[in-house]
Amino acid sequence: MSSTLAPVPIRSGLRLFFQLRKMITNHIDLLDASSKLGVTPSTLRKILAGGPISRFIQRKIGCALEGRERAAPIRRRRSRVERFLEIYHLYQERGTLQRVADEIGLSRERVRQILVKGSEFGLFEYKPSWEAGPPREKILADYRRRLTLKGVAQENRMSLCRLHRLLKVHRITPSALKEIRISAKKATCIERYDAVVVGFGHHPTTTELQQIPTTRSLTTQIRRLWGSIDLFRRERGIPQPKLRFQKIEEEKSFPPV
């Protein structure tokens, strides 16, 4: 009598291989077939990889594929995919992991693991409750207006701790926030400079900017943000202002008629 652990003949193995290959095209199909056929996913992977299986496993899968049932009627086993979807829909209705856990008799951590696994398989999109919050675009827009994380947290009625978690989820880096702050400060400097130009009636020289206390602080801010007054002028297309002695020389060369 042959052992039940003997390898399946090549012809039978090929037939089973082609049958399963039609059924299983992705990981979700693998989980579903595993539950319906009553074998582990690793066994199905072994068959699809061309590995040998026992006659018992071959008969078991063959009967399941042909739709045969045992003499004693048994309740159809739900597939893992169906189980994952059921728990996810229950989570959407109940709203918390603990409520779902209490209802189905599992631990809160086990429910979380199932939801994470189902999300990884692409069955649904599960996000922990602390990840639910304003989208990335709103966080950045609020930061452009408030320029502080505390202000953004107050704007969205959340704690700073939760906001920092959302920054990681949305991949908003400290360097990105720094660029926003610098851009906002530059915009303020440009507004102040334009007002100074209106007051002087022309683009002031560096000396003229240093003579007035209010414009002196503007000069310091420009140098801090742009590196120098010349770089600021170059970026904005401002011509180099003429010095006082240059203006006097021009007036002498063009005397009034």
Image: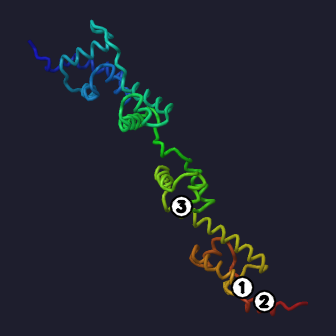
Instruction: Give the spatial CA distance, label 3 vs label 1.
Output: 38 Å
Residue type at tag 2: Glu
Q: Look at the numbered discs 2 and 1 and tell me whether their residues touch, using CB distance below 8 Å.
A: yes
> For this view, does 18 lie left or right of residue 147?
left
Q: In this orientation, which residue lies closer to the viewer: 126 or 102?
A: 102
Image spot of residue 185 (x, y percent): 62, 68
- Which corner quadrant of the image does residue 112 belong to? top left
**Outermost residue, top direction?**
71
Looking at the picture, tell me which residue is in the foreground, 9 or 27.
Answer: 27
The residue tagged with tag 2: helix, strand or loop? Answer: helix
- Looking at the rendered image, the quarter that the C terminus falls into is bottom right
Residue sticking out furthest to the front: 102
N-terminal of the pair, mark 2 or mark 1, is 1
Left or right, residue 109 beside residue 162? left
Disc nearer the start of the sequence (2/3):
3
Give the percent coordinates (x, y) of residue 53. 20, 22
Among numbered discs 3 and 1, the one appearing first in the sequence: 3
Q: Residue furthest left?
A: 1
From the image, tell me which residue sits under label 1: 242
Residue type pointed to by label 3: Leu
| Residue position marked by numbered label 2 in the rendering | 250
Task: Quote the CA–CA distance across marks 2 and 1.
Answer: 10 Å
Residue at 52% of width from left, 60% of height from top? 176
Question: Tag on residue 177?
Answer: 3
* 3 and 1 marks in contact (CB < 8 Å): no
In three-dimensional space, the C-alpha distance between marks 2 and 3, rounded to whole angstroms, equals 48 Å
The disc placed on residue 252 is none
Q: Position of residue 96 (x, y in %)?
A: 46, 37
Pick whichever, 48 or 79, lies toward us.
79
Give the residue drawn at x 69%, y 80%: 214
* Of marks 2 and 1, the one in the foreground: 1
Question: Which residue is depicted at the point 54% across and 52% down?
Answer: 158
